[in-house]
Image: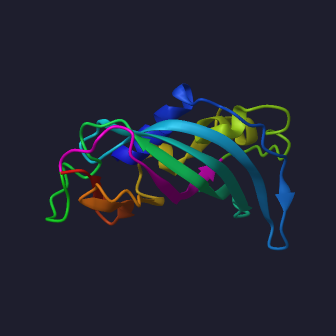
Amino acid sequence: MKKLTVLLLAGALAALTGGGSAAASSGDGTQHFGPFASASPDGGSCGAPWARDTFDRSFAVHDNGDGSFRLTEDFTNGSFTTTGPVSPGACETSNHHGSTVAMGVVGSLRGFLTGTVTSATFNAGGCTGGNQCSTAAGFVLAVFGPAATFTCFTGNGDCEFNFEYDSSDQSLTFRHWQDKSSPDGEQFVGDIASA
């Protein structure tokens, strides 16, 4: 999965800018962490970077009671700046996309990623005092420990995601792109494209 791969690799490349917060519990047994300010390159349907993203990353963890946890990562207050030259939808197989995007086009983004963590440990205070939780890999390590597995990292199919991008730049031919999970793995819809 191109989007997921870029998000996971971005952990090593992220420009971190915030501290976030410790866990807060809700009435249904779900604990919330964040938001954590993050930034990363973004890969399109061809696999090549097409933009630089900034966003707030928050996590919700629900204990399934069987040694597994449902982990949802929300991406809010997001924006992107295109790096070009290839548009994110350039390698789509549908008709409604372009092939190139100019450098410096800006827009907004939002999305989520959800999967299952299996771990014998859970440290609700793992994100306190640093930026280690501003990436998914850092969060899983800090909260669940080094032996934890997360289905969105292993690619076993139990990973849902949806990312949507919009730009009001009138010079664009296409101004909306969606990268989402599907029964076949990943689906791209639309584009952010100049031509």
Residue 9 drawn at (x, y percent): 47, 32
Q: Is the magenta stretch mostly helix, strand or loop?
A: strand
User: Residue at 49% across / 43% down in the picture?
Assistant: 153
Per the rendered image, the range of residues in magenta is 99-118
Residue that sits furthest to the bottom in the current view: 28
Q: Determine the image quadrant of residue 17.
A: top right
User: Residue at 54% across / 26% down in the picture?
Assistant: 12
Magenta span contains residue 111: yes
Q: Can residue 67 be seen in this view?
A: no
Residue 42 drawn at (x, y percent): 41, 41
Q: Can residue 183 be seen in this view?
A: yes
Q: 104 or 57: nearer the eye?
A: 104
Residue 73 drawn at (x, y percent): 61, 54
Left or right: residue 133 versus residue 111 is right
Q: How many marks?
A: 0
Magenta span contains residue 17: no
Residue 119 drawn at (x, y percent): 68, 46
Q: Is residue 51 above or below residue 130?
A: below
Left or right: residue 50 versus residue 69 is left
Q: Is residue 116 above or below residue 146?
A: below
User: Residue at 40% across / 57% down in the picture?
Assistant: 157
User: Residue at 29% across / 55% down in the picture?
Assistant: 171
Residue that sits furthest to the front in the current view: 170
Q: In this view, does 94 lie above or below 104?
A: below
